[in-house]
Image: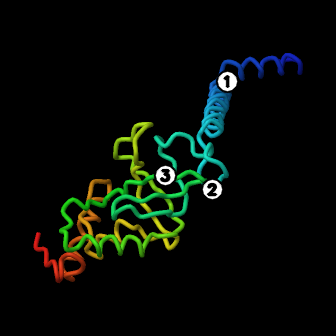
Amino acid sequence: MLPEPRHRARTLLSAWSTGPRRMIAMLAVLVLVALGIVGGLTIGRMSDSPALAGEPGTAALGPLTGPPTLYGRVQRVVDPATVVVDVGGRPVTVSVIGVDTASTPPCARADAQRFAQDFLDGQEVTLVPDPTLPAPAADAPTWPAYLVIGTQQSYTDAALVAGWVDPGQGRYRPGFEAGQRIAQDRRAGMWGPPCNRTS
């Protein structure tokens, strides 16, 4: 004999509460709660993170010890590996990642400096950090970064292919070395006359 409708409803509810559907419902609730927690943490991190360059004022930078990409305009080329960039009104001395000038011979230094100035002076640039390198200390005199100009060309790559610098450290070192080989094959920069560097 079939139970009364209200008894039938109670029977169905009992089956629901003890069957696999209850497990599915509980899992769905747990997923929603987890998503809410993760979403809240993400929003919190976004609101606590330092502002990127392009916003007015020096406070927009925050400490120059984290991984954000910054934007600015080149104020001055100190040497082929060191550049001063105006980032949100704050001068930032950048040590260009992947550029090593220690082995640039004296006969090539003036031309290497001229190349860097022609390539970078007054350019709007993106300062891209390298997460594989140690972060600089808060009081470090320079901030290591790749410099990318508005045409999306890396200054490091350009200087290596032009033959004015050696490849330095960084996550893209195999590519840096390939750029140097191009310069050597073409006898460009210090690899050609008057320096004719051989190694």
Secondary structure state at the residue bearing disc 2: loop
- Residue 77's label in the rendered image is none
Packing grade of label 2 (10 A; few <14, some 14-19, many >=20) is some
Looking at the picture, how far across and down is residue 5, in whole percent?
89, 21
Identified by mark 2, the residue type is: Gly
Select label 1 or label 2 by which is in front: 2
Judging depth in this view, the residue of 187 and 175 nearest the camera is 187
Question: Label 3: which residue?
Answer: 92
Question: Label 2: which residue?
Answer: 54
Looking at the picture, how far across and down is residue 176, in whole percent?
28, 65
- Residue 22's label in the rendered image is 1
Task: Give me the residue at 83% from left, 21% from top.
Answer: 9
| Marker count (numbered) | 3
Identified by mark 3, the residue type is: Val
Looking at the picture, how far across and down is residue 116, in whole percent?
37, 70
Judging depth in this view, the residue of 172 and 115 nearest the camera is 115
Task: Give me the residue at 17% from left, 82% from top.
Answer: 194
- Circles 3 and 1, Cβ within 8 Å, touching? The answer is no
Q: Quadrant of the rendered structure where residue 161 is?
A: bottom left
Quarter of the picture holding the N terminus: top right
